[in-house]
Amino acid sequence: MKTEWSYPIHRLRRLRRTESIRSMVRETTLTVDNLMAPIFVREGIDNVEPIESMPGIFRYPVDKVNDAIARMQKSGIKSFLLFGVPRTKDALGTQAYSENGVIVRAIERIKKEYPAVILAADVCLCEYTSHGHCGIVKNGSVDNDLTLPLLAKAAVSYAQAGADIVAPSAMMDHQVGTIRNALDDSDLKDCLIMGYSAKFASCFYGPFREAAGSRPEFGDREGYQMDFRNPKQAMREIATDINEGADIVMVKPALAYLDIIYQASKRFDVPIAAYNVSGEYSMLKAAAANGWLDEKKAIVETTMAIRRAGAGIVISYFAEQLAKWIGGVE
């Protein structure tokens, strides 16, 4: 039956007719170069430990962290974000900036065997303090200015050990500028800073806090992490970090904050990272384990949404799975 049309017909389905055509006109892509894999390194253990709330993710002893690097490199992953879990903790988080701390030793070990990998080191005190907060507690609250020099000290120690990127995540005002000055004064000018610039106070961090032992013993982090109701303030935070010397800025979490990623990518001419956090990982894993959705399709679709929003770097616990799928390995 012939249909008469009174207007020009644009048959957009022609662009979706075959997989080859769909691939040719695809607007958003994902490669292993977009992926950064988080790794937990823990002192005081001899064997790799599974993390109960994050199926498929592990804590590694310092002397076995290269096993993880070697395995993920085979999938094509080139960049990693390190988190330390020390044997002992105290009120000042001294193991965060110890010259013999867990992350310092992990960086040195990795770089000795794999000098070409990109290593980012998280710079915060929450994994190292006995109270679980991201800075020095004074009179029942986190003191911004007392915390800054300790963050700078930690960043310098990681950069001296060989970290390519330091990633301040404490959400202290002026943390990026303080660290940039400390790095420059220590002749570490080539070390990149990836600021956790728009890090929101989120319910999606729960599994990470189990993995890192960083749950606050009292109160919460809403006094320094961002209110998720404030997109304009997020842009101010990102602009401040850029002005203070951040080379890369991050939005965290990712899936509930795609609008923030999109706004940042349109407004700022610096690389944008997005952290697909532990709770986002675990809820997809749980749904897939219960047969409620197709795991591979869900992971690819959500990661592509993060890329589509404008993130050039996706920090993801799915990185190894994604890299294998991109490379055609099941």
Image: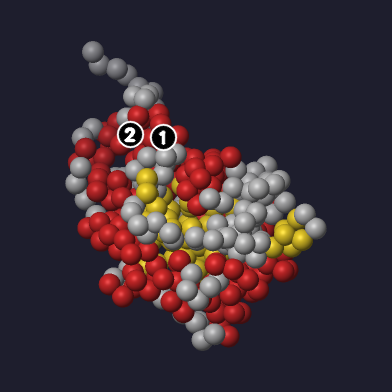
> What is the x, y in percent for residue 15?
28, 37
Is residue 60 or residue 303 the one in the foreground? Answer: 60
Residue displayed at 72% across by 64% down = 144
Lateral position of residue 187 relative to residue 49, left or right: right
Q: Residue at x 41, y 71 (%)?
A: 105
Q: Nearer the viewer, residue 276 or 264?
A: 276
Crowdedness of circle 1 by 10 Å Cα count: few (<14), some, many (20+)?
some
From this view, report whether residue 108 is shown above or below residue 210. Answer: below
Percent of width and height locating residue 220: 68, 46
SS at badge 2:
helix
In the rendered image, which quarter contains the C terminus?
Answer: top left
Left/right of residue 203 with respect to residue 8 in the rendered view: right
Element class at badge 1: helix
- Residue located beneath label 2 in the image: 295
Residue at image position (30%, 36%) is 296
Examine the rendering and report whether any part of residue 271 can be seen: no
Using the image, tell me which numbered label, if any, was put on residue 284.
Answer: 1
Q: Quadrant of residue 162?
A: bottom left
Cβ–Cβ below 8 Å for labels 1 and 2? yes
4 or 78, nearer to the observer: 78
Give the image quarter of residue 177: bottom right
Q: Is residue 31 above or below residue 145?
A: above
